[in-house]
Each structure stands twice: as C-alpha cells, then as structure tokens.
Image (spheres, grey):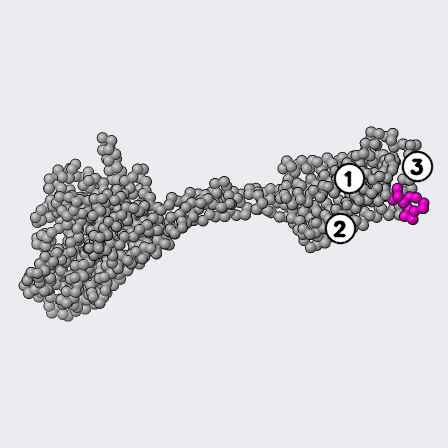
C-alpha cells in the first residue's frame, strides 16, 4: 500500500510539472507482444503532380505497408504538408502534389535481389509504370539513401534526404543532386559538454561507431572537454566488422563495467553494430546515465528502451517550432481504412498533457479498441516528437517552392500545357532546388544551401522507465548556440527526476572534489580529473569546492585556521594600551619623578659636603640628563610616526651622551682632586681651571655630528612589518642606517668604557666623600646593560625588540641614578651627622679648592 501511495504521489507531481511546460511532457507507450519497437524503416516518397485540386489517397492504398511508430508519424507529416500546399492558392495554384509511398524498400530489394523482377522495386526503372516522378524524398536511414542515390542520379531524379545529417551524403562527387534537409550538428559537442559541466560530471565514458563521423565527434569532444576540465574515463569504438565485433564484445562490456564513470556519451550510426552492442547489453542492467542524440531514444522489441537505465537517458534534439494546424489534422484523421486499428493506435507516441483524466480506462490493456482510439485521437500529437518528421515537412515545402519558382520562369510553357497532364522534367528543378529559400508556416527560415546553421538550438529531453509498460519523456532544458558563453545552456531543475532518493543528481567524478581549505594535487601519470587534495600552504586559502590553486591572502590579511577565508590583520605596536607598554611607561615616569626628587634634595642640601663633593654642578647636570633619559623612553611607546621615530634615536643618543660624559667629567674631577692637587704637581692647574667641565659639550657635540650625518643620509622611518606575525601588522620605527645607529651606540659605549676605566683606577683613593667607587660600579652596571642589550635585541623582533630597548634605557639610567645618588641620599636624609665639617676639615679644604 505504501508503494502505491508513493507511486501516485510521484505521478501527481509529474503531472504538475508537465502541465507547467506543456506540451513538452508525454508518455511513451511500450508493448512487447505486437510490434518490434521504434524501428526505423526506410520510406521512399516519390512526388508527382496533377492539374487541379486532387486529394491524396492517404487512407486507401499507400498506408498498407508495414508500419512502426516512426514511419506512421512520417507518413502523416508528409500528408499534412501536401494537403496544406494543395489548398494554398499562393503556391502552385491549380496544381496538386501527390505522393507514392514505398517503405521497407531496401529490405524488399535484398530479399528479391535474385528475382528477375528487381526493377519493380526502383522508381522509373520499369516500363509498366509510365508515371514520371518529379522528385524523390528518401530517409530516414542514410544507407538506403546512399544506395538509391546513384541510381536516382542515373534516372535524372533529384533526391531530398530528410533523415539526420550524415557527412557521407554531402559528397558532391558521388551525390551531386542529393540535398540534406537536416542541419549539421555543429554545436552538439559544445551542448553535451555544457550539460556535463552543469551537472559537475567530469569523468565520463564515450561509445562511438567506427566511422568518420564517430572519429570527428570524438576529436571535437576531446578538444571541448580539455577546455572545460572534463576527462574521458574510457572510449569504446564499436567496429563495424561483425567478426571483430563479436571478438571484442567482452572487452566492450568489461570496459564500461570496470570504469567508475557513471555517465556515458553515445554517438554514431544507430543502424551499425553500435545498436547491436546495446541490444546485447539491454538485459545486463547496466546502470549509467546515457547522453546521446534523439535518434537513440527508441524502444526495442522486448518493450524496453534501447538505452535502459535506472537514471534515465538525456537526449539532444534540434529544436523545431510547432507547425500550426498539425494538431487538428491528427485529431481529425481517422484510420478506419487500416487493417488493424488497435495495432496502429498502440504504436503512436502520444502527447497527453501528462493527464489521464480524459480517459475512462484505468488500464490500457483492458480498454476496448474503440475507447483507445477515441482517447488517442482526442489528444494532440506534436511535431517535436520527431525532428525527422519536421525535416520531411520542410522537404515537401522545398519541392513546392522550387517547382513554383521554376514555373514562374517558364510561364509561357505553362500556358501552352494548360489543360493537359503535367509532365515536368525534374532535371530542370535542380538549380531552383539548390538555392531555394523560404519561411515555412511555423515561421522558421529554411535554406537548402546552408547545411550549417549558426543559430542552432537544441531541446534536451530526459527519458526513463516509469512503469513496466510506460515510459516518461520530459523536456528539461535548452541549448542556444548564439547566446554568450555561460548563458547558452538553460536547465529546468524542477523538471528533472533521477529516480533517486531526495531527487539527488547522480555523480560521475574520478576524485571527490576538494573541500574549501584544500587544493587539487595532480596524481602522477593520470588525467587532470584524478587528483589528491592537499591543504593550502601557509597564508593561502581556497574558499570554494574543487579549486585548482589556493589564493594567497593580501599582505594586510591572514588565512584562518581552516584556510577558507582571509581575515584582516590587526595593527599592532607597543602602545599604552598594551600591559607591557603601560608598565614600562609607569616605570619611566616613576624613575623620572624619583630623579626629580633627588635633584630637589640636592638643591635643598647644596651646601653639605656630600653634595659639594666631586662638583655639585656636574651632579645637577647628571640628574637633569637622567630625567630626560627616563622620559625619552616614552618616545618608544605609542603608535610610531616619522617625528617620533627621528626623536627616539636622536634624543636617546644626545641625553645619554650628556649623562655618560657627565659621569666621565665627575670621574676625571675625582682623579684630579686626589692625584694632582699636590703643589709639586704640574697638572694642578687643570683642576683649578675647570677643564673637566668642557668634556660634556665636547662629547655632546661629537654625538650631534654623528646624529646629523645619520639624519642626513638615512634617517629612521615608520615601517609596517606584515610578515613577522601572522595576525598582526606590526608598526615599528626602522632605524634607517644600521651603521649610523651602531656608530652612535658605539660612541656612547666608548664614553662609558672610558668613564668606567678612569673610575676603576680611582676606586681606592682614600676619602669619606670620594665617589669613585660609586662611579665605577654605576658604569659597570651601565656597560653590562648595553653589552647584554646587543644579543638580546638581535634575537627579538617587533614589539619585544622595542620593549628590550626601552628596558635597557630604563635599566642603564636607573643604574646610574641608584649607584651614584642612592648612597648620597641615604647620608643626606638618614645620616645627616656624617656631613659635619669638624670631622673632615682637611677634606673640605681640598674640595673647596677643587671648585
């Protein structure tokens, strides 16, 4: 019961879809008892003329041939065209075109090939029939047309071939007066590959016939597939030699069964061993999506589609406009003269608007013949069912227009033959037939001299088994060659039913598409459709499925962890919002405040021996320079600008040069005070003249020269480092000239080393107020900090490098401050009694003289 509910649900859904696209949806009736399937039978239509209006004998003698669903449709299309022309007063007035129908001529000719009456099966080759035919329409199979073509040429009869276009028949040397009505498939390959790309099928097989059209199709297919990154999983070329075909039958089967391709393209002559191959496979349940042309959409003698598949068959058919009046013609036609009404009715393809509401039958097999016929003829029977019928329709009109033009040129001859039997020389029609152009009643331009149409349009149909005795064929899309690339294919997704769960489209790929974050990596010695998936490299992304290459993120962005998108980098620098930057700024301010406090203490106690010792003016200069040393570290914190970058290095170099040279001056003062104050010494005048005080401006001037050269040649500048850290754009001050930077730093170091050396030599001089030991230790700390700075600075980058430089500035400045002034502040503030002159009278005399 559940299966029945599902079946009727699908039926109802199909009816809804079909009604939205009427009349492009119809049922295909199948039976396995009374007919051989949709077999094409060659039909030769010989056209002749008579004066006046003569009705074709459409239901008397011509249709008593062996009929199939294909040729009955051809015959009715032919009679409809003849009836339209004969009733049209503007084409061949007072002249009727009549036809003699001969079907299965080639089979009959083969059967009677040894008969003495062979001539009876060829037109105009026997004397018993004195009727002269104007032109012969051959088809729909190319082989009978090719065989009869040379014979018709001998009998001086032009031939119009209404079957599918075949290159062999275009040979003007062999068939100079054979004209093909069907257009050449110039864009069939492009249409098929566009369909494959639409469904993401990049791993497909191809089965073609072993002939020139097959090889040409395969060549174009390979070329177009290469452009669209579609690969051929296998190619089966079905040979036409019967013996070789039987030898390779197993190879053909194994080739398709072992391949992972679920989509197979079929192209070739269906009257060759290619059809035999699929008849053999029909019972093997090969589940593939078949992609082919409309001539392969046929039912074979076991009541099944030739290309049987659970997924169905996709067929391409030339688009043909609906001919007005043809539906009415079919509905009013009544096959009462047929020998077997029921047999004929069951053969026909029907359009039924996808609805059985107008039928009183629940089961076709249980209906009476009369009811079936009434139902069949009540529904319309469209031209789009067969492109061959449309080409035959145009062929009849081409004959009428060519004859009409010929009669207009021979109007005098026409007047003389009036009232007599018409007997035209068909040879005279050749030049008119060759260049005939007209617009048919459907509004389509027909040009017999143009085989290749630049505005080719294809209808795409999907045919599949619906019920055991019923198939469903639906139009699912179009292909327009003349539209821009990318807009040529139109698919109606809601019309497609794949007989799969949740209407999922079948897949046919060699490798699973790479998900976002991965790229295709070609497999060695395999086609491009077969690949491995490898993660995208660092800072590269792939944001779509199946990308060939990863895309590198811009410099101001970085790839997320999944390598699927680029994220904007955050601008980073050692700012006050950063805990490290804030901490260093607080330390700098605290030490600068402490230094200012010590300066205030020294100013308040400026007359004490502790302050006076070793030149109090130099102490003031040193304290002020240390305040600026602490404050200059603030220039390294915050977002860098060109001005701050320049001030960072120059301010640091100058204030530290002042501080270091001041320490050097104080050290020299101590040495002079204790070594050269003896009256017997010749150097006493240096101390008395205040020469040590000139060390500060001299050293500072030299540093200013270095800084000037630095700023004049390659000054510091703002640099955005986008590569150092993944998630950040680091804004830092570039030193500009590294040589100039190290020259400035080296000069500062040489002053510090000089100060340390002199202080170290004077460390053991006796005196309570001798600060040589403190100066020596402070310079040891200063040199240790900056010697440690060099390797640490080179091993760090970004904000850490800036923080290291700031830390060294603070540490070296704090070392000078604490080592030199902390002991003095301790004595001034906590041990004031140690500053008494009574205990150190002699020492005070020396110091006063030093000043």
Q: Which residue is mark 2?
A: 704
Q: Quadrant of residue 52?
A: bottom left
Select label 2 or label 3 by which is in front.
Answer: 3
In-image side of 790 versus 67 (left or right): right
The residue positioned 35% from the left and 46% from the top of the image is 509
Q: Which mark is residue 778?
A: 1
Q: Is residue 74 above or below residue 793?
A: below
Q: Which mark is residue 842?
A: 3
Asked which secondary structure carries label 3, the reply is helix
The residue positioned 66% from the left and 36% from the top of the image is 582
Determine the CA span between mark 1 and mark 2. 24 Å
Q: Position of residue 300 (x, y in %)?
A: 18, 47
Predominant SS of the magenta segment:
loop
Asked which secondary structure carries label 1, the reply is helix
Q: Position of residue 661 (x, y in %)?
A: 79, 45
* Mark 1 or mark 2, earlier in chain: 2
Q: Residues within 10 Å of mark 2 (few under 14, many from 20)?
A: some
Decide if residue 736 is in sight here. yes
* Mark 3 or mark 1, earlier in chain: 1
Q: Quadrant of residue 345?
A: top left
Does the segment drawn in magenta span residue 681?
yes
* Mark 2 or mark 3, earlier in chain: 2
Does the segment drawn in magenta span residue 141?
no
In-image side of 186 versus 782 (left or right): left
**Which is more toward the observer, 441 or 661?**
661
Determine the CA span between mark 2 and mark 3. 41 Å
The magenta segment is: 672-684
The quadrant of the image that shows the N terminus is: top left
- 2 and 3 marks in contact (CB < 8 Å): no
Q: Position of residue 704 (x, y in %)?
A: 75, 50
């Amino acid at each position: 019961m559940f299966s029945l509910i599902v079946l009727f649900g699908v039926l109802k859904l199909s009816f809804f879809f079909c009604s939205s696209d009427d009349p492009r949806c119809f049922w295909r009736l199948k039976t396995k008892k009374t007919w051989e399937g949709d077999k094409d039978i060659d039909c030769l239509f010989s056209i002749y003329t008579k004066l006046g209006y003569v009705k074709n004998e459409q239901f008397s003698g011509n249709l008593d041939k062996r009929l199939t669903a294909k040729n009955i449709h051809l015959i009715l299309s032919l009679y409809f065209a003849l009836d339209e022309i004969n009733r049209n007063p503007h084409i061949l007035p007072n002249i009727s075109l009549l036809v003699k129908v001969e079907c299965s001529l080639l089979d009959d000719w083969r059967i009677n090939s040894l008969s003495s009456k062979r001539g009876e099966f060829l037109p105009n080759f026997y004397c018993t029939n004195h009727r002269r035919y104007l032109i012969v329409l051959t088809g729909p199979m190319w082989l009978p047309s090719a065989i009869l073509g040379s014979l018709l040429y001998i009998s001086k009869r032009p031939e119009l071939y209404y079957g599918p276009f075949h290159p062999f028949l275009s040979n003007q040397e062999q068939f100079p007066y054979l004209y093909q009505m069907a257009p050449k498939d110039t864009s069939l390959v492009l249409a098929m590959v566009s369909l494959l790309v639409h469904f993401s099928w990049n791993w497909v097989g191809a089965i073609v016939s072993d002939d020139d059209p097959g090889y040409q199709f395969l060549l174009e297919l390979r070329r177009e597939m290469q452009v669209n990154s579609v690969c051929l999983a296998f190619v089966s070329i079905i040979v036409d030699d019967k013996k070789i075909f039987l030898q390779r039958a197993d190879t053909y089967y194994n080739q398709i069964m072992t391949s992972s391709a679920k989509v197979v393209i079929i192209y070739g002559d269906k009257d060759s061993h290619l059809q035999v191959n699929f008849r053999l496979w029909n019972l093997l349940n090969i589940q593939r999506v078949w992609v082919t042309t409309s001539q392969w959409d046929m039912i074979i003698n076991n009541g099944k589609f030739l290309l049987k598949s659970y997924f169905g068959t996709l067929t391409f058919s030339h688009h043909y406009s609906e001919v007005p009046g043809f539906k009415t013609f079919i509905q009013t036609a009544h096959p009462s003269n047929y020998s077997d009404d029921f047999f004929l009715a069951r053969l026909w393809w029907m359009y039924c608007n996808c609805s059985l509401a107008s039928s009183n039958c629940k089961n076709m097999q249980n209906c009476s013949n009369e009811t079936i016929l009434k139902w069949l003829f009540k529904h319309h029977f469209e031209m789009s069912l067969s492109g061959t019928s449309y080409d035959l329709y145009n062929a009849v009109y081409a004959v009428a227009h060519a004859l009409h033009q010929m009669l207009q040129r021979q109007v005098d001859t026409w007047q003389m033959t009036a009232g007599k039997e018409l007997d035209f020389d068909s040879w005279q029609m050749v030049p008119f037939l060759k260049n005939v152009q007209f617009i048919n009643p459907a509004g389509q331009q027909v040009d017999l001299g143009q085989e290749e149409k630049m505005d080719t349009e294809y209808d795409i149909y999907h045919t599949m088994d619906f019920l055991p005795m019923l198939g469903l064929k639906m139009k699912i899309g179009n292909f327009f060659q003349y539209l821009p690339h990318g807009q040529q294919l139109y698919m109606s997704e809601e019309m497609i039913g794949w007989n799969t769960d949740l209407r999922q489209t079948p897949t046919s790929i060699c490798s699973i598409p790479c998900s976002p974050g991965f790229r295709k990596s070609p497999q060695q010695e395999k086609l491009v459709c077969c690949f491995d998936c490898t993660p995208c490299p660092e800072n590269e992304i792939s944001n779509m499925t199946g990308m060939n290459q990863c895309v590198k993120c811009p410099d101001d962005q970085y790839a997320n962890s999944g390598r699927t998108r680029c994220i904007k980098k955050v601008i980073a620098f050692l700012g006050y919002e950063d805990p490290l930057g804030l901490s260093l700024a607080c330390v700098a301010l605290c030490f600068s405040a402490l230094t200012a406090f010590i300066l205030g203490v020294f100013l308040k106690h400026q007359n004490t021996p502790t302050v006076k010792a070793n030149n109090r003016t130099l102490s003031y200069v040193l304290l002020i320079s240390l305040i600026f040393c602490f404050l200059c570290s603030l220039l390294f914190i915050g977002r860098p600008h060109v001005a701050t970058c320049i001030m960072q290095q120059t301010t640091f170099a100058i204030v530290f040069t002042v501080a270091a040279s001041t320490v050097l001056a104080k050290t020299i003062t101590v040495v002079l005070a204790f070594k050269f104050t003896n009256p017997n010494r010749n150097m006493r005048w240096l101390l008395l003249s205040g020469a040590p005080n000139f060390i500060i401006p001299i050293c500072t001037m030299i540093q200013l020269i270095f800084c000037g050269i630095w700023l004049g040649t390659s000054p510091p500048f703002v640099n955005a480092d986008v590569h150092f850290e993944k998630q950040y754009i680091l804004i830092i001050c570039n030193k500009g000239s590294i040589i100039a930077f190290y020259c400035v730093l080296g000069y500062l170091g040489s002053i510090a080393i000089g100060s340390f050396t002199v202080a170290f030599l004077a460390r053991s001089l006796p005196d309570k107020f001798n600060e040589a030991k403190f100066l020596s230790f402070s310079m040891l700390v200063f040199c240790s900090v900056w010697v440690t700075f060099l390797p640490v600075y080179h091993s760090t980058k970004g904000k850490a490098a800036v923080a290291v430089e700031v830390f060294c500035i603070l540490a070296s400045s704090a070392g000078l401050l604490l080592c030199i002034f902390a002991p003095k502040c301790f004595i001034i503030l906590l041990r004031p009694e140690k500053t008494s002159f009574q205990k150190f009278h002699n020492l005070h005399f020396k110091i006063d003289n030093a000043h």
